[in-house]
Amino acid sequence: MRPMAFAFVLILFLSASARAEWLLDLKGSDFTFGSVKNVAVAEVHHFTDLNASIQEDGAFSFKIALDGFDTGIEIRNQRMREFLFDTERFPNAAYSGTLDIEALRRLKTGQRAEVGVTGILSLYGHQQPLEVRLVVTRLGEKRVLITPGRSIYLNAGDFGLLPGLEKLRQLAGLKAISPVVPINFYLVFVERP
């Protein structure tokens, strides 16, 4: 191979390596949210349609299709889609920001690190800054697990969801539904060139 051709191939290879990103392994991941009704009845629900990536520079994006959740009761799923999330107008929730990619790179298999992330959560046409602590665990050479480092709670009022929550309360004949929602997740990412 001539020197110029070799140099060109090398540059292409290095450029491709520099564009490696971490993509969500949906089968190995889960995202749940809780609800509390009538003060003492707690339930856990989960989203099934997630999409996330972490770029080489640490920029990340996480998207949830709000139609893709399961509460265990189909009529409740339907009512939440229609009256709470209004998924026809607002089909997704999204969180984006930047994390310390160097902390991720330094980890050896079995090691973990806690990192702080400040991002923007977009939900129901509203955007709010959201700071979270995450625990990143290296599962293998090209796999990491990300979980919350501390409890995460969202207030429905911060995103204009209180009228929808009130409608759900009325339809279900409940005394109360808490506007504060706990969030939990485990997200497995795989490095791809």
Image (spheres, grey):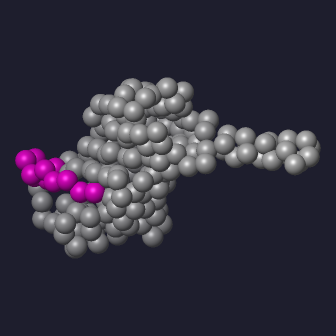
Number of numbered markers: 0
The magenta-colored residue range is: 36-46
Q: Is residue 99 visible to the viewer in this orientation of the structure?
A: yes
**Is 10 within the magenta?**
no
Q: Quadrant of residue 133?
A: top left
* Direction from residue 190 to residue 2 in the image, left or right: right
The residue at 57%/39% (across/down) is: 59
Please name whichever residue, 163 or 16, is drawn nearer the observer in this view of the structure: 16
As drawn, is 154 to the left or to the right of 60? Answer: left
Magenta stretch, main secondary structure, is strand
Residue, far front: 1
Q: Position of residue 60 (x, y in %)?
A: 53, 42
14 relative to 147 in the view: left or right: right
Of all residues, the one furthest to the left in this rendering is 40
Q: Is residue 44 magenta?
A: yes
Report the residue at 45% width, 51% height from top: 24
Q: Is residue 95 visible?
A: no
Q: Nearer the viewer, residue 55 or 82?
A: 55
What percent of the width, then of the height, locates residue 84? 33, 61
Measuring from the top left, give residue 129's x and y in whole percent.
Answer: 47, 36
Where residue 61 appears, x then y in whole percent? 52, 47
Q: What residue is shown at x 56% (from left), y 36% (from top)?
A: 58
Residue shown at 48%/66% (left/top)?
89
Q: Nearer the viewer, residue 49 or 28?
A: 28
